[in-house]
Image (spheres, rainbow, N blue to C red):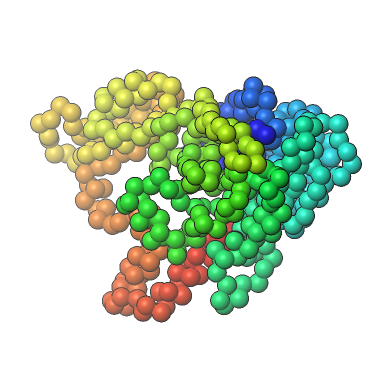
Amino acid sequence: MRILHTADWHIGAKTDDLDRFNEQKYALQQVVEISQRYNVDMVIIAGDIYENIVPSAEDEELFYKTAVELSRNGDCAVIAIAGNHDDPRRLSNAKIFADKFGIYLVGYIDEISINRSPKDTNIFATNCGKGFIEFQTRKGEKAVVALLPFPSFYRYKTVKKQDDNLQDKIASWLNDGAKHFRDDTINITVAHLTSYGSNLDPDDYLSYTTLSSTYGYVDQRVFPQNAQYTALGHIHNTLTVNKDHNIFYSGSLINQFFSVNNDTPTNVIIADLDCNGANNIIKQPLDVKLLKKFSVNSVAEAHKVLSEHPEDLVKIIIENVDNTDEEVDNTEYTPYITMSDVKNLRSKHPNLVTLSVITNQARAHTDITSKKNLTNGEIFDNFAKAKNGTPADPKVKELFLSLMSEDLYEAD
């Protein structure tokens, strides 16, 4: 059985103020073309279909049109789960797609239904239940897909008890579907959550494990070990969580943020699976815009950089600008930037998305560490010191961090 794994389409997203809809549409056309070229049996969309909980009519139309094209009139099963950006109820309501096209949209693990009537298609659903759907191909191959939409106590209608641990709950919710895995089936896990990869360097690994108690990172050992493939969504980079067990993030549809490394193409993953594992895994790149960020010291340098990257989307940070009247004997130094300079940059370079100017005066008054570079624990410590002049009480801090861990997985 051949599957295509994709995730984090975020249809309707913007990069800063730049609308990316047409780029997303073009990228989805490529996903359809790749699925047809590889003649895949199943397409898995591992959450965050939309950017907004209530997507626009245009965004929904693009998703439904793409899903129907991917299904090839039912010859390819299409499975999509709700991510944290998706409304699980809204997604699940489109059940008509399952009967007509073999498209399965799952918002809740306990509200999965199929039409058990025999289908004259390449692949069709034969059984379902809490957290799983079972499929069979015309050739007789069978597959069980365990499904875990974005997990939270709120979404899973579970009252959190004092000794409840979210990671233990996630393991239990995964098992609802995975307990149907068999030796004679191709077993696939699909989830939208945050885990960490085995290919991290020691410093990165330490940062992930340090944050796990605060940010709800899921240890990869909670994933069913008898799955031939685990398709994950939520992290926007293509990431190998565990190569031996074929646990992967496909990454996002397009590059979205300048704050992370987005200077390489995005990917979908093609995997050939049988009951013994994965025979072949291909990371197929998409033709998408790259996002690049540059720091320069003058308007002239900004023009030069933008001219050198006409096909990329660029963020320019002009630093060391002095908006005082002091004269500086440096030809590369920009004493000030006028609105005319800004308009000229934007008119000549449509690839300029964001322009930031940092003046020396502004720099002198920015002796403050950005919260985005601090852990929740450090933020709480700073708050306690500012209010009371003393470090936070350890028990109070522990309570705060435990609440933050839950909230981050509760937030929609």
- Give the residue at x 77% y 32%: 139
Farthest residue toward the left?
329
- Residue 238, horizontal then vertical, whole percent: 48, 39
Relative horizontal placement of residue 337, taking residue 252 as reference (left or right): left
Vertical position of residue 191 compared to residue 293: above or below: below
- Give the residue at x 24% y 56%: 367
Which of the two residues, 336 or 257, is positioned nearer the viewer here?
A: 257
Vertical position of residue 204 compared to residue 97: above or below: below
Vertical position of residue 305 compared to residue 355: above or below: above
- Residue 299, horizontal then vertical, whole percent: 28, 28
Q: Quadrant of residue 211?
A: bottom left
- Give the residue at x 78% y 36%: 140
Q: Quadrant of residue 79?
A: top right
Farthest residue toward the right?
117
Which of the two residues, 1 or 332, is positioned nearer the viewer here?
A: 1
- Give the residue at x 74% y 41%: 142
Q: Is residue 171 visible?
A: yes
